[in-house]
Image (cartoon, rainbow, N blue to C red):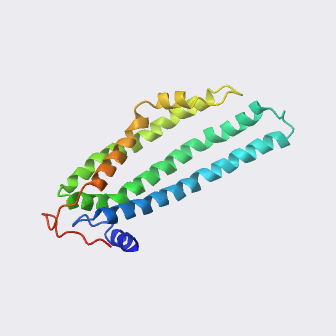
Amino acid sequence: MLGSIKHALRNLANPNGRDSRATFWYWVLLIFIFRFLAGMMISVPMSMKMMAAAVGTVRDGAPASDEAVLKAMMDIVTNELPTMVWMGIGLGVLTMLLMAASLIRRLHDSDLPGWLVLIPGAIYGFALARAPQQIAVATELLKSMKPGVPPDMAAMMQQQGMMVYLGWIPALMILFIGLRKSTEGPNRYGDAPVTS
């Protein structure tokens, strides 16, 4: 496992050669853990602000109603949403960059041209580019919510349209590429990768 991660780190910008399935998936695992931790670092402060707003609403003598607490919490979400989306976009771009060369080498391992990485990359890039436009839609939905009524997640997802599904296409393509069988022995991209 550590050998696979070291290999991926040494070859971050090197699309030449081949990566075995094990090498690729250990690298993806590390990126997934990194994204999870970074996502927590982005979302936990907002959750703390929401809790502080809820406690502050009750402590400051406002009526201890569900409506007042919910409004205070939703105001925090509405204010923090643009920052969270922009941080998510940055994290998405970083993930694409970290994964690109390894994904190309994985394509090479199954004797496919590396330029195929442009397909999931372009779809994911398009989804990331559309995210700022979705901020306005989500913010308006949050502002239009009635006090005391929990958010209708189905309606929020419906307002996002096909963008909800667009982000899954690259993930499924990466899964397909990552699971493809390796070419036996050498191929036009080099010798069979050494699994570490």
* Residue under the image location 55 percent in, 47 percent down: 84
User: Does residue 144 appear left or right of residue 34 in this picture?
Assistant: right
* Residue under the image location 45 percent in, 40 percent down: 131
Q: Nearer the viewer, residue 170 or 93?
A: 170
Q: Compared to 74, does 188 lie above or below?
A: below
Question: Total of numbered circles in the picture?
Answer: 0
User: Does residue 185 appear left or right of residue 163 in this picture?
Assistant: left
Q: Nearer the viewer, residue 4 or 43?
A: 4
Image location of residue 113, percent across then percent down: 18, 55
User: Does residue 143 appear left or right of residue 126 in this picture?
Assistant: right
Residue 191 position by quadrant: bottom left
Query: Which quarter of the rendered picture does the N terminus lie within?
Result: bottom left
Query: Which quarter of the rendered picture does the C terminus lie within?
Result: bottom left
Q: Compared to 78, does 34 lie above or below?
A: below
Q: Going by the picture, which residue comes out furthest to the left? A: 188
Q: Compared to 38, does 152 lie above or below?
A: above
Image location of residue 158, percent across then percent down: 48, 28
Image location of residue 118, percent across then percent down: 26, 49
* Residue under the image location 20 percent in, 58 percent down: 110
Image location of residue 42, percent across then percent down: 57, 53
